[in-house]
Amino acid sequence: MKKFVQIFKIPLLVFTVLLVVGVVCKIIKDSRPPIEFVRGNTQTATDERVFDVADKLTDEEEAVLREKIQAAEDLCGIDIVVVILNQSLEEYAKSYESIIGYVEPYQYTMVYADNFYEDGMFGYDAPYGDGVILVDNWYREADGGVYSWVDTSGKVQNLLRDSDVEFILDTCLDYVDDDPAYAYGYFVELMADYLDPNQNWGDALGGIFSILVGLMAGLIFFFVNFGGKKGKNTVETRTYVKNGKAEVRAQQDIFLTKTIQKRKIETDTNRSSGGSGGHISAGGHSYGGGGHRR
């Protein structure tokens, strides 16, 4: 029993510390009041959040989407705008090239999203502030692409990486052709999952606890397998000496032949991502986000 305690005293100590930390984390998470937001922007041009210009949703589906957006906005303290189009944006976007430079096809929806967000003075905290806008255009442009874009503004630009936006777009728009209402609703849900500060707090505590548990398991494994073992000297003077003289057995690798195989590395030329990265709009405002092509 004494030997057992001696071997496991450090792992047991670590386990006790982890148990205390876990209990404290649980108490903090359960007792911490949910973060509530108060809208600061009183200048928004409209209370509407769903703009189905392409008429892809029924009235009932639009109503459900508005409810989801309202719940997500209250939860995260951001504006969420969804615009659905079915028209060429090439001429529209090209008209801004004198201000923002050459515009690629995947950026047509980006230019539209910038201007729509700014014209509506969206932003939860202030005009052009905290929020996100999705512009999904069903029209197939001259290059064969059907493009969508998400602009992230204010704190959302800082909270979401380009890779996060790309994942959200690729995930939800996989369903858009078969079920637009589900796809746009899923977009809102994913945004809420990523941006809910209460959920992020819980995830952070859970992540810390998981790391500590992993550390404990590693220490226990170490002490069980190596704590009581001491290395033995397996090499003596006579190991490499025969009759008082050193004996070295030479080995030689003989090169016989070689075979070279060539293989073409295939590249994906039909990626769903339509572009990403921060940019400055024609109106001079900073956005993050990214695009999707289908």
Image (cartoon, rainbow, N blue to C red):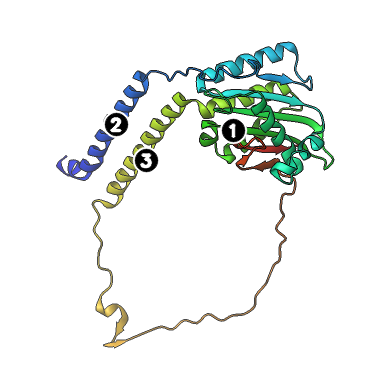
What residue is pinned by disc 2? 21
- The quadrant holding residue 70 is top right
Which circle, 3 or 2, is nearer the viewer? 2
Circles 3 and 2 in contact, beta carbons < 8 Å: no
> In the figure, is residue 95 to the left or right of 202?
right
Q: Residue furthest left?
A: 2
What residue is pinned by disc 1? 152
**Type of residue at label 2?**
Val
Choose the circle earlier in sequence order: 3 or 2. Answer: 2
What's the CA distance linking mark 3 and mark 2?
Answer: 14 Å
Report the front residue among 186 and 266: 186
Instruction: Report the quarter where the C terminus lies.
Output: top right
Residue 162 at x, y percent in the picture? 59, 40
Category of crowding for the residue at label 2, using alpha-carbon neighbours closer than 10 angstroms: few (below 14), some (14–19), many (at least 20): some
**Type of residue at label 3?**
Gly
Category of crowding for the residue at label 1, using alpha-carbon neighbours closer than 10 angstroms: few (below 14), some (14–19), many (at least 20): many
Which circle, 2 or 1, is nearer the viewer? 1
> In the figure, is residue 108 to the left or right of 30?
right
- Which residue is depicted at the point 56% across and 20% down? 72
What residue is pinned by disc 3? 214
> In the figure, is residue 149 to the left or right of 142?
left
